[in-house]
Amino acid sequence: MAADIEGYRSDLTRTYVFGSPTPRQREIWNLEKRTQAAAFGAVRIGASCESVDEAARGVIEAAGLGPGYAVPGLPHRTGHGIGLDIHEDTYIVKGNKTPLEAGMFFSNEPMICIYGEFGVRLEDHIYITETGPRWFTPLRHSIDDPFGYET
């Protein structure tokens, strides 16, 4: 989903289950949440973009998926910059040694793909202030209450 407002683009992805989630869907949805949290936890001024990707990938690999860009697991980057284009620098990906700095704005979307079964992507956005990272979009609450209406 994307919106264009005064030349600036948005980008947002959500994964929902129609009906009741299976135990496996619940497990992977919760793994996605932990992966997103690990990426956010790695964001600090001066850290490299690739260190955020490594933090996300570490959670997925510890759960037995991957390694690296192999599936089942995380087959692409953890995030990307957002601004005048939907996908732009700086990319949160292996090999990007760009240091994070105040004013950067990027997605946190470490999707998990299990080919032939399903995938989960929760894309939220982070901006970096002088005092550290802040969420720009509200986080999903649970697979059963993705909008937080019941909390």
Image (cartoon, rainbow, N blue to C red):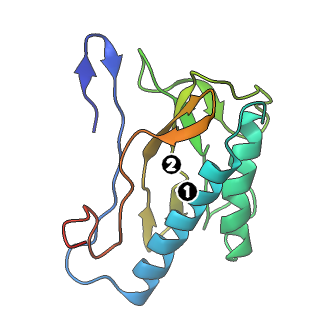
Could you tell which of marks 1 and 2 lies nearer the N-terminus? 1
For residue 78, above or below residue 146:
above
Q: Looking at the image, can residue 118 be seen?
A: yes
Q: Quadrant of residue 46?
A: top right
Is 131 left, or right, of 118 in this rendering? right
Q: Looking at the image, can residue 114 be seen?
A: no
Is 46 left, or right, of 133 in this rendering? right
Q: Residue at x 51, y 40 (%)?
A: 134
- In space, the residues marked 1 and 2 are separated at their CA atoms by 7 Å
Please, what is the three-letter code of the amino acid marked with disc 2?
Glu
Q: Nearer the viewer, residue 12 or 148?
A: 148
Residue 71 on image: x %, y %: 62, 63
Is 124 left, or right, of 15 in this rendering? right
Disc on res. 8: none
For residue 109, above or below residue 66:
above
Element under disc 1: helix
Q: Residue at x 60, y 68 (%)?
A: 72
Q: Quadrant of residue 5?
A: top left
Q: Nearer the viewer, mark 1 or mark 2?
A: 1
Q: Residue at x 61, y 64 (%)?
A: 73
For residue 53, above or below residue 85:
below
Residue 122 on image: x %, y %: 42, 55
| Residue with the mark numbered 1 | 36
| Residue with the mark numbered 2 | 109
- Dot 1 alpha-carbon crowd within 10 angstroms: few under 14, some 14 to 19, many 20 or more: many
Callouts 1 and 2 close, C-beta under 8 Å: yes
- Dot 2 alpha-carbon crowd within 10 angstroms: few under 14, some 14 to 19, many 20 or more: many
Residue 27 on image: x %, y %: 49, 80
